[in-house]
């Protein structure tokens, strides 16, 4: 009876927390967006000049609302506190870049991402160990600590950067993030993952939806690196906490293809003078707009549909 009452009380608190997170995000963005730096229009992006003058860096608002909502309504432990700090740190590195007159260099941001990724790996290993669940085949494998740490660092660094590269169309990055983290939320429930971090996924999703209320085409403001980089690290942590981090590959497939191909293309050309995908504009959302003549709304809907289909297939594989 006591446990039942306790569960009921938390469900009420969770319900209030979800509504609070969404409402607070919408209200904070409406009241504070005028204090954000203004976008200067990205020189090489398709239709980049159309964003000039819009408030940029709105990620600082919805990420801080998420952090406050988590502290107020979630069951907090040391691990969650560490993740919150790292998410906020990643958000601030993006926001300072958004607000700078001269954008930070790629190598500086990449190094900062690497440091954050290493801390995530160490924190996760300390609290959870190095066991990976391969849910599709129903087996678990314990990885050697060094190998596991390297894989986690790659996961976190890649997630931050592919999500960041996908942020170029109104509503695209945020919509894909909600789809991906809620897919993990569903799989967590199917696998019986019991962790206090679980509720944080819902809080982040509704804060993201509060932002998307203003970012839907035609957008009134932009999340900037402050939002996209925070999304990337959060998605990586969600994948880790599911116990099935390799499911990141299908559940974030559109992120990987859209943002990842551009990173690979640039890296091969810059460091090895290898030019691939000469007839493909990257990120792929720019190819869709420039070469396929898709509207912004079509890009968001079609990319989201592709990810939903892949996510549903992944959920079914885990279920059976």
Image (spheres, rainbow, N blue to C red):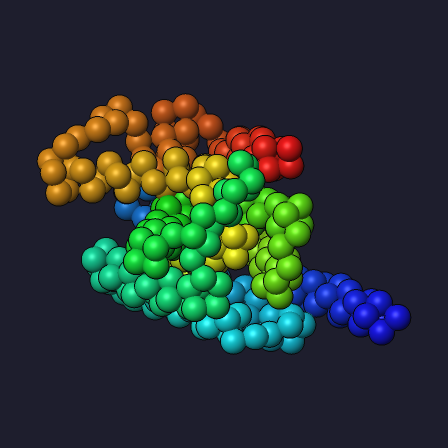
Query: Residue 72: horizontal and vertical position, in percent?
Result: 65, 76
Name the image quarter holding the N terminus: bottom right
Does residue 93 appear left or right of residue 191 in this picture?
Answer: left
Question: Nearest the camera: 23 or 86?
Answer: 86
Residue at 43% x, 25% y is 293
Image quadrant containing the C terminus: top right
Asked where in the image residue 310 lies, by quadrant, the reply is: top right
- Residue 54 picture location, percent across and down: 45, 56
Which residue: 51% across, 65% down? Answer: 63
Kindly tell me whether residue 2 is visible in this rendering: yes
Residue at the spot x=34%, y=55% of the render?
144
Q: Is 256 placed left or right of 306 in the picture?
A: left
The x, y position of residue 53, in whole percent, is 41, 56
Residue 59 x, y percent position in the rendering: 48, 62
Q: Answer with the quarter of the image where residue 74 lies.
A: bottom right
Question: In this orientation, which residue lies closer to the viewer: 47 or 257?
Answer: 257
Residue ranking furthest to the right: 1
Regarding residue 297, the answer to whether it shows in the image is no
Position of 161 compared to 299: left or right? Answer: left
Q: Is residue 20 above or below residue 205?
A: below
Note whether 271 is above or below 287 in the view shown.
below
* Up-down relation of residue 209 to residue 3 (above or below): above
Q: In this view, does 290 lie to the left or right of 136?
A: left
Name which residue lies at 62% across and 55% down.
193
């Amino acid at each position: 009876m006591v446990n039942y009452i306790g569960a009921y009380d938390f469900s009420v608190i969770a319900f209030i927390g979800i509504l609070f997170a969404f409402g607070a995000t919408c209200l904070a963005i409406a009241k504070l967006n005028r204090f954000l730096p203004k976008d200067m229009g990205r020189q090489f992006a398709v239709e980049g000049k159309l964003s000039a003058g819009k408030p940029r860096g709105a990620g600082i608002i919805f990420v801080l609302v998420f952090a406050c909502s988590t502290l107020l309504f979630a069951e907090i432990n040391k691990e969650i506190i560490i993740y919150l700090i790292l998410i906020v740190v990643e958000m601030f590195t993006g926001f300072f870049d958004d607000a700078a007159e001269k954008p930070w260099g790629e190598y500086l941001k990449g190094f900062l991402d690497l440091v954050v990724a290493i801390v995530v790996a160490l924190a996760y290993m300390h609290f959870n160990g190095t066991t990976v669940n391969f849910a599709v085949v129903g087996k678990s494998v314990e990885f050697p600590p060094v190998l596991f740490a390297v894989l986690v660092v790659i996961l976190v660094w890649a997630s931050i950067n592919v999500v960041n590269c996908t942020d170029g169309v109104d509503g695209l990055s945020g919509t894909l993030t909600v789809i991906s983290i809620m897919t993990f939320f569903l799989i967590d429930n199917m696998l019986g993952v019991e962790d206090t971090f679980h509720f944080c996924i819902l809080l982040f999703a509704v804060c993201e939806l509060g932002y998307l209320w203003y970012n839907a085409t035609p957008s009134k403001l932009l999340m900037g690196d402050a939002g996209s980089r925070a999304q990337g690290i959060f998605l990586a942590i969600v994948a880790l906490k599911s116990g099935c981090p390799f499911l990141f590959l299908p559940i974030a497939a559109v992120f990987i293809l859209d943002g990842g191909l551009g990173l690979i293309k640039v890296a091969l050309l810059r460091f090895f003078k290898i030019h691939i995908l000469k007839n493909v504009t990257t990120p792929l959302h720019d190819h869709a707009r420039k070469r396929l003549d898709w509207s912004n709304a079509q890009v968001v809907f079609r990319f989201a549909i592709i990810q939903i289909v892949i996510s549903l297939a992944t959920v079914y594989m885990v279920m059976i």
